[in-house]
Amino acid sequence: MIRRGSWHIELLPEARRQILSLRDPIQNRLRKAIRLLSEDPTPADSIPMRGKGVGLHRLCVGNYRVVYRL
């Protein structure tokens, strides 16, 4: 088993505003998914993006997508 270090998460101001505009249950699901990325930045359900998104990863959380860079 590979032990991973803890990753630091930074939300862009626009991402923070968009999350705050959602209903509480959805906010909580997104926050939990983002928080878990600090423990495992490449979970099994994350997808490396291609094309214009090279270098980014995408994580589906219900009908929403979390796009992030390592």
Image (spheres, rainbow, N blue to C red):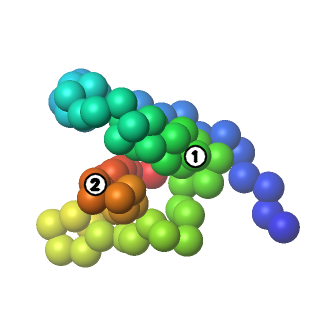
Amino acid bearing label 2 = Tyr
Element type at marker 1?
helix
User: Residue 41 at x, y = what percent?
Assistant: 54, 54
Q: Is residue 6 left or right of residue 61?
A: right
Q: Which residue is mark 2?
A: 64
Q: Answer yes or no: is residue 36 visible.
A: yes
Give the camera-side residue of 30 and 52: 30
- Which one is earlier in the sequence, the residue at label 1 or at label 2? 1
**How dense is the environment of label 1, judged by Cα within 10 Å: few (below 14), some, or many (20 and up)?**
some
Q: Is residue 52 left or right of residue 56?
A: left
Q: Which residue is mark 1?
A: 36
Numbered tag placed on residue 65 in the rendering = none
User: Residue 64 at x, y = what percent?
Assistant: 28, 54
> What residue lies at 58% left-to-right and 46% top-to-bottom?
36
Where is residue 51, by image quadrant?
Answer: bottom left
> What residue lies at 22% left-to-right and 64% top-to-bottom?
53
Give the camera-side residue of 23 and 30: 23
**How dense is the environment of label 2, judged by Cα within 10 Å: few (below 14), some, or many (20 and up)?**
few
Task: Report the number of numbered marks.
Answer: 2
Gap in angstroms between the C-alphas marked 1 and 2: 16 Å
